């Protein structure tokens, strides 16, 4: 029996269509064939994508593929883009019988707790318990960090060093802090270092762009090996450098109330 594209799809999940001709990433500008889907249950996934249950992602439909708003289906997809969210490319889907939410007529109360949201809040509580700084804010600048002192000393910068296939390729985002949920108060700007690599080791880490707003769950940078900030960050004189490495370490602003509930639960 011949192997189909569905058989070899890397990311297979049961999801509910939230919006048509829409996307969760600013990098997706052509939305004619994209839809926003809530991942209800992950059926098959590589390690880097196993934390997306309960998250809304972008699905680019295959040629001729059609879905309806509120339809639930099993989507067979492969990775496409990763930024403030995840985008995947579909090779097909199987409708879940009787699972069109609008037709079901059941309220969220009647259906019971949302398992996706519960899983997401559990992850946020777990990350919040370990975070040294939790802030709400906005990305106002993104730029390359200064090279490590050792690399600069040899006269060539990081480009002359051997680069591993698992190298993170650190980048710095400057965050204008609106509110400190946990940690030292009085911080106006901070630097968040994040890996731009899409290697499996770093694929799940948030990738930031100017204008993004939300809640950041952070820890002091003890991993990058960078001693000073780059030119873009230096202009803001930020109060400290932090890292953001897990898929729930950044939550968009429209979910801030949900995050505050999870943060409070983490410290009970």
Image (tube, grey):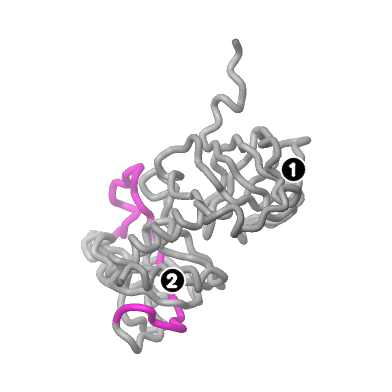
* Quarter of the view holding residue 74: top right
The residue sitting at 50% across, 57% down in the picture is 117
Q: Could you tell me which quadrant the N terminus lies in?
A: top right
The numbered dot on residue 158 is none
Judge left or right: residue 195 versus residue 79. Answer: left
The residue sitting at 76% across, 46% down in the picture is 68
Q: Residue 217, percent across and down?
A: 38, 68
Image height of 119 relative to 189, above or below: above
Q: Could you tell me which quadrant the C terminus lies in?
A: bottom left
Report the residue marked by disc 1. 67
In terms of secondary structure, where does tag 1 sit?
A: loop
Tell me if I can see residue 262 in this picture. yes
Report the residue marked by disc 2. 261
**In this view of the protein, which residue sits in the foreground, 253 or 111?**
111
The residue sitting at 47% across, 59% down in the picture is 207
* Quarter of the view holding residue 96: top right
Q: Residue 246, percent across and down?
A: 38, 57
Q: Closer to us: mark 2 or mark 1?
A: 2
**In this view of the protein, which residue sits in the foreground, 137 or 55?**
55
**In this view of the protein, which residue sits in the foreground, 234 or 34?**
34
Judge left or right: residue 86 versus residue 233. Answer: right
Q: Residue 148, percent across and down?
A: 26, 63
- Residue count near mark 1 (Cα–Cα under 10 Å), binned few <14, some 14–19, many ≥20: some
Name of the residue lying farthest toward the front: 110
Does the stretch in magenta take in 174?
yes
Magenta-tinted stretch: 155-183
- Residue count near mark 2 (Cα–Cα under 10 Å), binned few <14, some 14–19, many ≥20: few
Tell me if I can see residue 70 in this picture. no
CA separation in Å, label 2 and label 1: 33 Å
């Amino acid at each position: 029996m011949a192997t189909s594209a569905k058989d070899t799809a890397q990311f297979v999940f049961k999801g509910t269509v939230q919006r048509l001709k829409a996307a969760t990433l600013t990098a997706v500008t052509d939305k004619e064939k994209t839809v926003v889907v809530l991942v209800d249950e992950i059926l098959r996934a590589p390690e880097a994508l196993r934390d997306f249950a309960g998250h809304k992602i972008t699905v680019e439909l295959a040629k001729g593929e059609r879905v309806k708003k509120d339809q639930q289906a099993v989507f067979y997809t492969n990775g496409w883009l990763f930024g403030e969210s995840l985008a995947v490319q579909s090779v097909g889907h199987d409708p879940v019988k009787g699972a069109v939410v609008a037709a079901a007529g059941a309220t969220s109360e009647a259906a019971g707790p949302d398992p996706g949201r519960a899983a997401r809040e559990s992850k946020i509580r777990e990350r919040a318990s370990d975070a040294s700084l939790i802030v709400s804010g906005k990305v106002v600048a993104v730029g390359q960090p200064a090279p490590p002192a050792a690399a600069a000393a040899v006269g060539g910068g990081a480009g002359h060093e051997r680069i591993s296939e698992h190298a993170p390729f650190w980048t710095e985002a400057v965050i204008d802090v609106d509110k400190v949920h946990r940690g030292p108060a009085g911080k106006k700007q901070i630097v968040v270092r994040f890996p731009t690599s899409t290697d499996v080791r770093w694929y799940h880490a948030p990738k930031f762009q100017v204008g993004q707003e939300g809640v950041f769950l952070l820890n002091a940078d003890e991993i990058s090996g960078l001693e000073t900030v780059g030119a873009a960050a230096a202009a803001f004189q930020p109060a400290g450098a932090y890292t953001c490495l897990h898929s729930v370490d950044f939550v968009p602003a429209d979910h801030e109330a949900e995050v505050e509930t999870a943060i409070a639960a983490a410290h009970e």
